Amino acid sequence: MPLALLALAVSAFGIGTTEFVMMGLLPNVANDLGTSVPTAGYLVSAYAIGVVVGAPLLTALGSRLPRKRMLVLLMALFTVGNLASAFAPSFGLLIAGRVLAGLPHGAFFGVGAVVAARLVTEDRRARAVATMFLGLTIANIVGVPVATLLGQHLGWRATFLVVAGIGVVAMASLARLVPQVADEQHGGLRQELGALRNRQVVLGLLTAVFGFAGVFAVYSYLASMMTEVTGFGESTVTLVLALFGIGMTLGALIAGPLTDRALRPTLYGSLAALAAMLVVFDITVHTKWAALLSVVVLGAVGFMTTTPLQMLVMNKARHAPTLASASNHSAFNLANAGGAWLGGVAIAAGWGWTSPTLVGAVLAVIGLAIALIAGLTDRDPASGSRVVASSEPLPQLSEVR
């Protein structure tokens, strides 16, 4: 694997840290800025809004830029957004800083996935994309807990200053390690938009919205389940979230080679395993050791869906994959928001703290159904036969200086 993937993983580590650390800092921010914790929760939504809006918008604006330059500029915007968050004098400006920090998220992963796939041979593309995503999963094991502790002891502003520092390191890594590509072909904005009209791309995005919503229907309330149902103390919540991050990392490591070998079967299997595990978790959450083991497995099967979904939309939009790839991250963040909302609705309806597990299972089954429909209707225009993935590979990077 090329060293350029390390630069992409470092960038993903910074992005993952700033995305998830806010959940642990809400009480600190609320106390400092004189607001309530539920109101401070809008900071999580503000970041997600930035991702959903920024992914297609920034990708479209940078459609004719060289991809290396685009990656560096996106990390520069990420750094500025975190600096703005660190120095925000009011809650309203902190909301604006979080939106700004979220804007480059989806576009970076969209462009980065295309670059990662083109740095390696065709039979290792999914592993390359999964390697980039490892930075995101490791952030949940190391970055988020450490950043949360830092924020609790030195103030939440220190957390965002450190994340901004990671952004500077990521920019330097991208500039140094990602190859400069000569004569890179760009399809332009019209061709990128045209790829989004591909039925298989649309079905892939819908699969991401519903399938991954099953993960966040539970993850959003995991801490409450562990304290209210399993019986763990609040001090154990950080460990539980780290275990979920370990599961995510294992899922990324497993999904890469499996996706390279059989894309759609990996997608089907991961969604089916996710639905089954969510049902099992509804039972095991009542026993401490079983709950901890289930958290790891749940993180693994949940994150196994990301690599095949990313590769699917890139394959089906192979002539102009960047916007489709970035839009996939908008779909993931819609899944985050939708899953959390539906899980909250179930709890508010009086169905109990474990009800999001069954809500998540239903969402995962819907995602699996959409994926199966996509597979059954995926016809090769030349022969009319069903195909597992695109028969035409992404073009490789050429004339690397």
Image (cartoon, grey):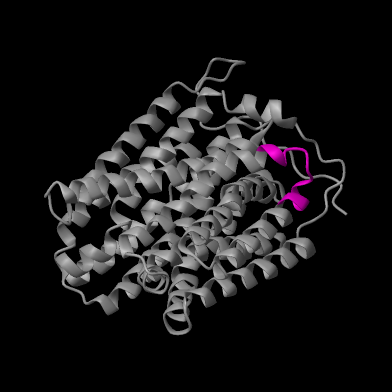
Q: Considering only vertical position in the picture, is 301 above or below 192?
A: below
Q: Is residue 204 above or below residue 146?
A: above
Q: Quadrant of the C terminus?
A: bottom right
Residue 339 rendering spot, x and y as whole percentages: 33, 46
Q: Quadrant of residue 296?
A: bottom left
Specify whether residue 393 is painted magenta: no
Q: Position of residue 353 (x, y in %)?
A: 17, 57
Residue 160, position as x, y percentages in the image: 55, 70
- The residue positioned 69% from the left and 48% from the top of the image is 115
Q: Nearer the viewer, residue 332 or 251?
A: 332
Left or right: 165 in relation to 62: left
Q: Is residue 310 left or right of residue 251?
A: right
| 250 relative position to 186: left or right | left
- Relative vertical location of residue 365 with respect to residue 340 in this rendering, above or below: above
**Outermost residue, bottom direction?**
153
Determine which quarter of the picture holds residue 226: bottom left
**175 or 305: which is nearer to us?**
175
Compared with residue 209, is residue 101 higher up or lower down, i.e. above or below? below
The residue under the point 34% across, 50% down is 215
| Residue 66 is covered by the magenta coloring | yes
- Residue at the spot x=73%, y=57% of the render? 72
Q: Nearer the viewer, residue 256 or 10?
A: 10
Q: Quadrant of the N terminus?
A: bottom right
Question: Residue 270, can we see it?
Answer: no
Q: Which residues are magenta?
A: 60-70
Residue 27 position within the rendered picture, expressed as x and y whole percent measured from the top left: 35, 71
Q: Is residue 343 visible?
A: yes
